[in-house]
Image (spheres, rainbow, N blue to C red):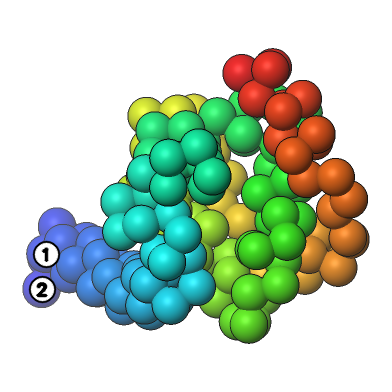
Amino acid sequence: ISEVDAMKMLVLLLSLLSNLVFADAKVDYMLNCQGCHLADGSGLNHAVPSMKNTVGKFLQVEGGRDFLVRVPGVANAPISDKKLADLLNLILTTMSPKQLGDDFVPYTQAEVKRLRSKTLLNVAKVREKLVANF
């Protein structure tokens, strides 16, 4: 097997593995997020914010990355820290890819564990302040 063929096989294997992770995250999205944010992340009028072409902007402002994990609906989702990290990464890369910079760093299990344990008070006020900095 040539080095080029080996690299092609490695890329294919990594692609298949990422599809498995995202398939699991897609189910978690359907079960935990889609009811309010809808299948495409567009939200429910003004009652539930849209994530579509927007959620990635939170990573561009100070405190925004932490906010995405600490939002009560996210922090209290009945899934593991690893699954939540995968879910957040799926949401960001599929619903707001143009807002992610070249320096995008995916969430990790350890980061999610650390952040979701910190209660976020006054969600609307914190969100408003972050959005004002977009």
Determine the residue positioned at 85% across, 53% down: 120
Q: Are marks 1 and 2 in contact (CB under 8 Å)?
A: yes
User: Looking at the picture, does residue 119 appear above or below residue 43?
Assistant: below
Crowd tier of the residue under label 1, counting other residues whose Cα lies within 10 Å: few below 14, some 14–19, many 20 or above: few
Amino acid tagged 2:
Ile
In the picture provided, is 42 more to the left or to the right than 36? Answer: left
Percent position of residue 117, x then y:
86, 68
In the picture provided, is 40 more to the left or to the right than 128? Answer: left
The circle on residue 5 is: 1
User: Looking at the picture, does residue 78 appear above or below residue 108?
Assistant: below
Any part of residue 24 in sight: yes
Percent position of residue 53, x then y:
39, 33
Image quadrant assignment for residue 10: bottom left
- Is disc 2 placed on a helix, strand or loop? loop
Percent position of residue 58, x then y:
62, 34
Q: How many labels does the image show?
A: 2
In the picture provided, is 11 more to the left or to the right than 119? Answer: left
Percent position of residue 86, x then y:
51, 67
Crowd tier of the residue under label 2, counting other residues whose Cα lies within 10 Å: few below 14, some 14–19, many 20 or above: few
Mark 2 highlights which residue? 1
Determine the residue positioned at 37% across, 44% down: 42
User: Looking at the picture, does residue 131 appear above or below residue 22?
Assistant: above
Determine the residue positioned at 30% across, 59% down: 39
Image quadrant assignment for residue 65: top right
Amino acid tagged 1:
Asp
- Is disc 1 placed on a helix, strand or loop? helix
Q: Which of 1 and 28 is in front in this view?
A: 28
